[in-house]
Image (cartoon, grey):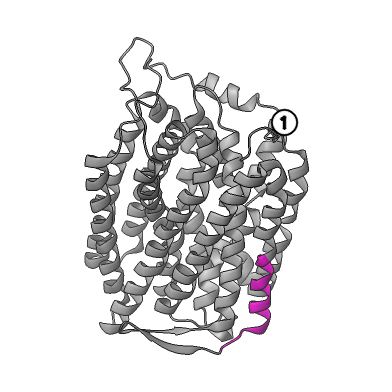
Amino acid sequence: MAQEQITGSKNPWSFVPSLYFAQGIPFIIVNQLSVAMLMSMGVSKELIGLIGSLLSIPWSIKFLWSPIVDTHNTKRWWLIMMQFILAVGFLSMAIVMKVSPDLMPMIIIFSMIAFVSATHDIAIDGYYLYALDDGNQALFSGIRSAFYRVAMIFSGGLLAFIAGEVGTKYLDIRFGWVVSFAVASIVMFSIWVYHRFTLPQVETVRVKSETKANIPFAKIFKDYFMQDKIGIVVSFILVYRLGEAILLKMVQPFLMDKPEAGGLGIPLKDVGIIYGTFGILALVFGGILGGWLVKKYGLRKAILPLAFIMHLPNLLYVYLAATLPTGHWGVNLFSISFDIYPVAQICVLLEQFGYGIGFTAFMVFLLRTSKGEYKTSHYAISTGIMALGMILPGAVSGIIQHSAGYFWLFLICSILTIPSLLLIKFLPIGDDNIKG
């Protein structure tokens, strides 16, 4: 089997931004925008938490088919093919929402998009691992995180704003979502065209051989789980985002819920601005800063303080749930009208900025667990374990909220960040000679 290798000098700026913008769109639509959509359509928070967690399963088990992506054809072929299917998937969602009032067809299409998006992730991350050396992987972790967050602004901010604005104008929130998914389809199709004709060839074409069909699943998993202190590594990956797993599913319901139900009562289009736009901009800057800090000081020195900066701002949601600030300002920007809720916005900005810093360090750590001939599969295993650690907490988040309220929910989220901080000192991070 031919080994993948760089065939020439390739400028990372020619592909890193566009690839990670493309990667972020379907992930955020499935894992974040779907929450806002279901909430706007009156679905219960218990069901929202359950559906959201079930939709995340493909990312937790993607290591099961990552060896196929790793050994069949090139990563470039896979990611371009998946982008085309995703464009069709978003268009299908727009059509289904237009013609069918039932929830089940939407869930089926979301599930298909989730599976394709997880495969898309495998191919993009593999492409990245082979196209950049270790130093540039650390440096561009911040850049790739930044453009992933730009995709979050588009998917979680702009699309939510469009749905809310169009839905309000035509008194039909479903029609608002039809327009949003049509826009998502057009954007993804444009990305597919761009990558189809401009994405650099950084791999040799894999040649057929008698052993190609025999994917070495056992060797891939054995090599991964024979790493130094793998028990500590897996435990850390499982718990690093434990608090966030609950927070992620309930932040938008909290922002949108009525004050009498313990929420802030913010309209959908304004949530798109507060959480999906300004909040993501803060996350982008945090991601860039986190990548620079890891590059400058090395992962061993940086990971604990950066993780602490990521987790501490969760307490801001405890404050918001306790005080329920209601003040807001009307804004008209380029003929676009929306409201800003200053206290909520500041808390979201600080939380997202801290998250951007800490998550970048975590992603660099995951890259360090991806080694050897099948590092694409190893990275898929790591991210799959990460996703697995978020399924159960996310599934019960709505139940916890219903039983205890938002205040106790967010307090539990904050407490659940502690185990990951305690595990950091035991991690096998050997970067004394190579920063990042």
Residue 313 in sight from this viewpoint = yes
At 55% from the left edge and 67% from the top edge, which residue is drawn? 250
In the rendered view, would you say 276 is above or below 240? below
Image coordinates for residue 173, horizontal then vertical, percent: 32, 76
Q: What are the residue bounds of the magenta stretch?
A: 313-326
Q: Is residue 379 left or right of residue 203?
A: right
Residue 315 forms part of the magenta stretch: yes
Q: Is residue 342 left or right of residue 156?
A: right
Residue 389 in sight from this viewpoint = no
At 66% from the left edge and 66% from the top edge, which residue is drawn? 313
Element on which disc 1 rests: loop
Residue 40 forms part of the magenta stretch: no
Q: Main secondary structure of the magenta part?
A: helix
Point out the image quarter for the N terminus: top left
Image coordinates for residue 125, horizontal then vertical, percent: 45, 39
At 67% from the left edge and 32% from the top edge, which residue is drawn? 433
Q: Is residue 31 left or right of residue 223?
A: left
Image coordinates for residue 245, horizontal then vertical, percent: 59, 56
